Image: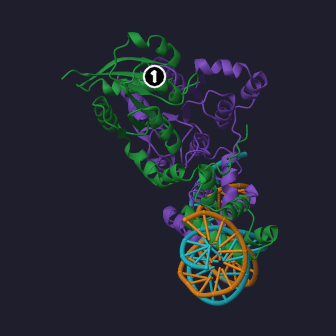
Chain colours: A purple, B green, C orange, D cyan
DNA sequence: GGAAAAATACCCAGTTTTTGGTATTGTCAG
DNA sequence: CTGACAATACCAAAAACTGGGTATTTTTCC
């Protein structure tokens, strides 16, 4: 059996290093890389060969919720495993709806993580032990989960989300154009589409929209 | 030299295991134990022989802030190193006031952590590299706090705060002018002053500033 | 393979914000 | 009383953003 290729996205270097150190011994797993910055990661997404993506939710520039969506938009068959501190139903639901296969807490132990990775790599769903209670408590939600496995996605295209993220990092159209290697006109067009789709008024409105739709986290600002 | 005895309190098992796995190689360090539950930890506190306590802040049953206080109340000479994801000044300040010697982020790398542990074990203060900027940026604010307790919020004047609040409600200069019965020119002037004082870039930057300084709450959905 | 959607790019006119000035009136503490 | 600061107001030019279009190329999906 070929080893499972694992890639991890989390803004906490110590955590990544720690988990990798723990997983290093596992014979069936191969740690192919990690990124501290979701945006950087997405730019090199196509070049990576990965079986299971471990994604955090709480990250400064981009929420793991939208990151999962972006990954699955680019690669429908991608196996995403959420690895996060959030033990509330809302986050589980959001992630599952985006199409992630697994959800596990940072308070889990290694064997559970390894188990989750293996299950997910085979295309199966895996919900962490501690999370299951929470999910069970929400019976209707659970039914929804089983019935509608497929993605509730935002109306924004992946490029538009990309541009939106740069806008709310306070970049001007010019800067965005340079960053994405496209014309300023194109950025203007994207901006127009985004404003139209979100019914937001300006960049401030876009930021509020982004917070409300879990595209970014409201707290720690970069 | 005797190895430094380290004890870690954090509710994330994976994180503890990971960090311990990383620190296991260090020759001068000895990992004497960990606890996932601050309360459990405190009950056996007296029986433990520890040099440096690594404490998380964000824990379910008890905040790390209180925990640090408890530790130092029981053992005045205890060396406590905060190891947390919170990169804001408020938390740093709280912890330092409780008497912790070090404050370092989970986004740090291992060498910085090791360095912090060693410094703290010698009774020195250690503030993480990324945190230092935050602390520096807040120094004036601190002075304001000490000197003039009446305006601890910000260096903005009453009127400026008033205008700021309207700006982040996405009103244009014109609308603000009408609302406040002043000239549009005046609003422009206020806007200028606000931008200058806050070092923000535009209305979006002002919103972020307002959130960070608790002038407004970022309203989350459920 | 072909239609639909997405991403790209351009034009233009208009609005808004930002920047860099100056200047007059209050107001309040020392 | 006086000087510092706050609040008011104006001017003008530059930069950025908004909103109305059109149009080509690429990707994606059926």
Residue D11: x %, y % from top left: 67, 89
Q: Is the residue marked by circle 1 packed among few (<14), some (14-19), or many (20+) residues within 10 Å?
A: few
Left or right of B156? Residue B21 is: left
**Residue A123 appearing in the image:** no
Residue A113: x %, y % from top left: 49, 23
Q: In which quadrant will I find the N terminus of chain B?
A: top left
Q: Nearer the viewer, residue B160 or B76?
A: B76
Residue at horizontal 65%, vertical 43%? A214
Residue B170: x %, y % from top left: 73, 61
Q: How many numbered circles does the render carry? A: 1
Q: Which residue is mark 1?
A: B73
- Chain of the residue under label 1: B
Mark 1 element type: helix
Residue at horizontal 50%, vertical 33%? A54
Residue at horizontal 32%, vertical 22%? B51
**Residue B154 appearing in the image:** yes
Q: Nearer the viewer, residue B79 or D11?
A: B79
Residue at horizontal 49%, vertical 66%? A178
Residue A221: x %, y % from top left: 55, 49
In this view, which residue lies farthest toward the left? Answer: B1
Reply above or below: A22 against A97.
above
Q: Nearer the viewer, residue B57 or B17?
A: B57
Q: In which quadrant will I find the C terminus of chain B?
A: top right
Q: Nearer the viewer, residue D29 or B207?
A: B207
Which quadrant holds residue B128? Answer: top left
Which quadrant holds residue B109? Answer: top left
């Amino acid at each position: 059996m070929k080893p499972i290729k694992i890639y991890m996205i989390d803004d906490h270097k110590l955590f990544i290093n720690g988990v990798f150190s723990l997983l290093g011994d596992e014979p069936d797993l191969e740690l192919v890389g990690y990124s501290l910055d979701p945006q950087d990661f997405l730019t090199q997404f196509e070049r990576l060969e990965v079986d299971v993506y471990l994604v955090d939710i709480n990250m400064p520039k981009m929420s793991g919720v939208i990151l999962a969506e972006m990954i699955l938009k680019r690669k429908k068959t991608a196996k995403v495993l959420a690895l996060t501190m959030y033990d509330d139903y809302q986050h589980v639901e959001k992630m599952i709806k985006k199409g992630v296969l697994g959800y596990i807490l940072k308070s889990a132990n290694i064997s559970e993580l390894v188990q989750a990775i293996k299950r997910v790599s085979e295309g199966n769903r895996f919900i962490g032990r501690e999370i299951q209670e929470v999910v069970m408590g929400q019976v209707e939600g659970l039914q929804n989960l089983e019935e509608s496995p497929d993605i509730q996605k935002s109306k924004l295209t992946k490029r538009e989300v990309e541009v939106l993220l740069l806008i709310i990092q306070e970049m001007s159209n010019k800067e965005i154009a340079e960053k994405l290697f496209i014309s300023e006109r194109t950025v203007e067009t994207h901006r127009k589409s985004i404003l139209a789709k979100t019914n937001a008024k300006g960049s401030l409105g876009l930021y509020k929209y982004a917070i409300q739709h879990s595209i970014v986290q409201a707290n720690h600002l970069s």
